[in-house]
Image (cartoon, grey):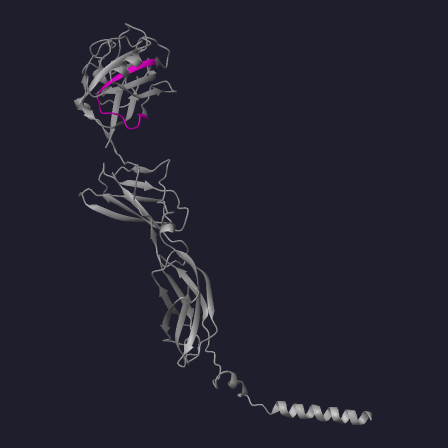
Amino acid sequence: MKQYKLYNTCLLTGLLLMMGCSKTPTDYREYLNGEELVYPGKVANARALPGNGRVQLIWQPSPDQSITQYRVFWNNGADSINIPATTHGTSDTVRCTIADLSEYVYSFMIYSYDAKGNRSVSTEINNARVYGSVYIATLNNRLTNPDNPYTVNDDNSVTLRFVAPDTINIRTILKYTNQNNQETHVSLNAAADELTLTDYKFGTPVLYQSSYIPVSNALDTFEVPRYDTFPSIYRLVACDKSLFREHDMWGDMGIFQSDTRVSKLWDGSVGPQGYPNIFHSDGGGNLPRVLSFDMGKVYSNLGVLEETGRDCCNNPDRFEVWGIADLTDAIPEMSPDDGGWKAAMESKGWTLLKEVIRTDNGNNAYKTNLIDNPPPVRYIRIRVLHNANGENSYVNMSEITFWNKE
């Protein structure tokens, strides 16, 4: 009985196997309307290059010779573009630039198509960034060097200095007026921190605008939407001492003798001088004491003072420098050792250009900057507060020099 059941089981299994083997490889076509399902080759190494309101997709084509075009979809398939397949070389590159895109992060689907409309499996590119006005609004021009923005060189060329850029800077364009009154443009690359203008016209503005790329493979360069103005550039021009004149004012100290006058301060001597080639005051008062003179013309931007003492003694190591352009009702009738003298000078329109404090013996030439953005100045008063050797009456000096910023 067992043998009979085994025989029937084997017979049934054999019949089922014969029926299974009788199907042909094309029997699935009844589910595809008699068509064979064909997948063209998909693209390789697809990636996106971001741009300004656009993106470029690039890929290596499939070697499948049947491919006639590619189609790219985005916005969940609502938008698409067709690209003809002009090459099947796997070492070639296909480029597809899609313009007029909003600033956003996109996903793209790339398909290969043959002449019959069969398409490949999709190739996805995700997180494809498109830049625009929001990104541009974050950009700033390179910063100028805050400690030393420029140097005027001996040949009157100007070296401009910037700090290193903090993002992917490409270049900075500088726009300035040259000595022929022509607008000139020069470029500072990202790796350089300084640039020299050989033909700059002093007193004119320098404007600059930087450009950036958001990532290293970006399609487009983005400019800062505005120019910034470089810090004002001046050269120092020595004031013309041939125009200087003595101009005694109320309360000025007297002179020791006729050949030690105030005019000795602009006779062109270099270095500490000996008696009598100096200004030497009389001894008729105690410090503070003041002397005054006329520079002969109005200077709009006095910038630097150099004072040189005597070769031995009675040299000021603390003094004030005051300036004004017009003397009309400008001279207070008050002794310079009066506690209210400084306030009286200010009330009359004088400006304290500098309080000089020397820490040496006062002999050698001492150069110092005056205040920034001074008013126009023609007349000078120097109020000596203290001498290096402690002498409290006599005041000696060899030379005074001023420079104007132009």
- The answer to whether residue 380 is magenta is yes
Q: In this view of the protein, can residue 71 be seen by the observer?
A: yes
- The secondary structure that most of the magenta stretch takes on is strand
| Residue 18 or residue 345, whichever sits in front | 18
Q: Position of residue 47 (x, y in %)?
A: 44, 64
Q: Locate residue 73, reporting x and y percent.
A: 41, 67
Q: Which of 368 and 103 lies nearest the eye of the viewer?
A: 103
Q: Quadrant of the C terminus?
A: top left
What residue span does the magenta drawing correspond to? 368-385
Which residue reaches farthest right?
1
Question: For the point 67% across and 93% down, which residue is it?
Answer: 15
At horizontal 41% and vertical 56% (from top left) the residue drawn is 104
Query: Residue 360: x, y in percent?
Result: 38, 20
Nearest the camera: 41 or 217?
41
Residue 158 location, quadrant? top left
Residue 219 as seen in the image, left or right of residue 331? right
Question: How many numbered circles does the render carry?
Answer: 0
Residue 125 on the magenta span = no
List the single residue furthest toward the top. 284
Position of 124 compared to 264: left or right?
right
Quarter of the figure that contains the N terminus: bottom right
Task: Classify 1 as above or below 303.
Answer: below
**Can residue 313 be seen in this snapshot?**
no
Residue 381 locus on image (x, y percent): 25, 16
Closer to the camera, 177 or 266? 177
Query: Is residue 82 shown above or below 11?
Result: above
In this rendering, is residue 225 above or below 278? Answer: below
